[in-house]
Amino acid sequence: MPRFDNEGFNPQKRIDNDTRDRSVPVDENYYSNVPVDLNFNSRGASESEVRDNQTSFTPNYNTLEAPKRSERQSDYNFVPEVQRDYDAERRTANAQRQPSQEKVKPKKKKMSRRRRAYRMHQIRMGIIAALIVIILIPSLLIAGVLGKINYDEHVDNRYVASVDLQKSPFVKNILLLGVDARPKEESEKSRADTMMLISLDVKHRCIKMTSFLRDTWVYIPEKDGYQRLNAASTYGGYSGVVNTIEYNFGVRIDGYVVADFEMFKVLVDSIGGVEVEVTKKEAKEVTKHKKRYGNVVLEEGKHILTGEQALAYCRIRKIDTDFKRTQRQRTVMTSILNEAKKAGPFTLYKMANRSAPYLETDLTKSQLMRIALFASMCLGDKMVQQKVPFEGTWKYANKGGASVISIDAQKNKELLKDSIFNKTADEISANDKNE
């Protein structure tokens, strides 16, 4: 049975509703102007005709003129309003875009922590490898040079206590000894012809060269008596010269370097000679006594001297005093150092490599490398020279029938300490000019 029958559907109620009055009251008929007839099929032909509000145009091709090209082009380019030229809009927008509205480049993807750590490790290893190459090659070259030097065992000074010697961590004192050893002669038995203390002062950034006159009358501990300073090597070898200078002047000497005259010639020739101004008396002395000075000829004026000529120049002694002789030695040494400052690494290596076989020292290889570092910190600055005994502290004397230089030992000790450890290069130069 249908559902609505069970729910009490009353068919009679529908019949009653059909008889109800459904007309609209006159006061509520809002559509009174609307035609009552809603039957569209019963309308006349005039009412059912649909009009086209658009203008109708039928061209007469016999009477119309052909349109101009510009008009035809506009007809062909006609685009309905609903269609849009997106390319034109995009170009216009790009032209009007402000700098601040420019397209931002996408950010690079961040590197992961592990990859970043690996990259840093590669960079560190590359730097370490470069440093090894930079350090290792010069070290090997330096090791080759150091291997050619003759080394002596260091002997401590047993005649003066270390605490009684003045020293400084900013100063290295190296005693340079020049000897003229003859064949079949023990080197340490030969007298030191040149004694020069090279002081590397990093505090005042200068190199101080102090010549000790060989005729200075001093106490020699190994002899237990007085004698000329250059005789100290005869009694105690090269260490005996160090002991004598430390005992008499109270300055700590870090080591000695001995060079014979052959080394001196090689050193000068390896840098292409040294520039020296030769006086007329000096040129005449060397040229006149060829046998004494190795058959060398010198001319008056400023010249670039070869190793043979520079050696002869330093050995001149008959025309003046030992003071002038040591001054000539310091002049040549200053010229060598000046050339070394201007030389490149290859020239410096050549100088060291050629000179090494003629050197003898009580310094170890590590000590020599530290001293080379000290020298590099001072080489670019000033160099000054002085002599012992100082002016006003000496006089000539006769000892055992020989002419010697008698000195005020205490006064020279004080002046030497002050100049090496306390004075600047300018102060030493000013004092030398006043003398």
Image (cartoon, rainbow, N blue to C red):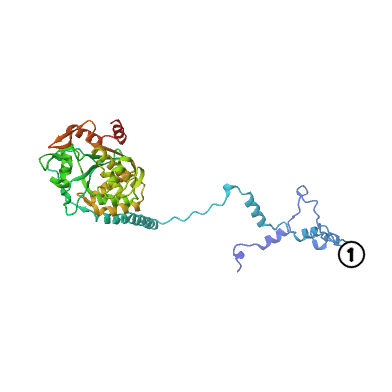
Above or below residue 104? Residue 410 is above
Q: Position of residue 62 (x, y in %)?
A: 89, 64
Residue occupying the far right of the picture? 63
Residue ID for mark 1: 62
> Residue 243 appears in which quarter of the rendering?
top left
Residue 114: x, y in percent? 38, 57
Numbered disc 1: secondary structure: loop
Q: In the displayed structure, does residue 220 sit left or right of residue 305?
A: left
| Residue 39 left/right relative to 162 | right
Task: Please give left or right for residue 410 compared with residue 7 in the image.
Answer: left
Instruction: Give whichever of 420, 196 is nearer the camera.
Output: 196
Identity, as a three-letter code, of the amino acid under mark 1: Asn
Q: In this picture, is 369 found above or below 415?
A: below
Q: Residue at the left extreme?
A: 224
Residue 405, image x and y in percent? 18, 35
Residue 397 position, x and y percent, is: 16, 34
Could you say which is closer to the camera, residue 192 or residue 362? Answer: 192
Q: Is residue 173 above or below residue 79?
A: above
Q: Which quadrant, please, contains the N terminus? A: bottom right
| Residue 69 sits above or below residue 212 on the image | below
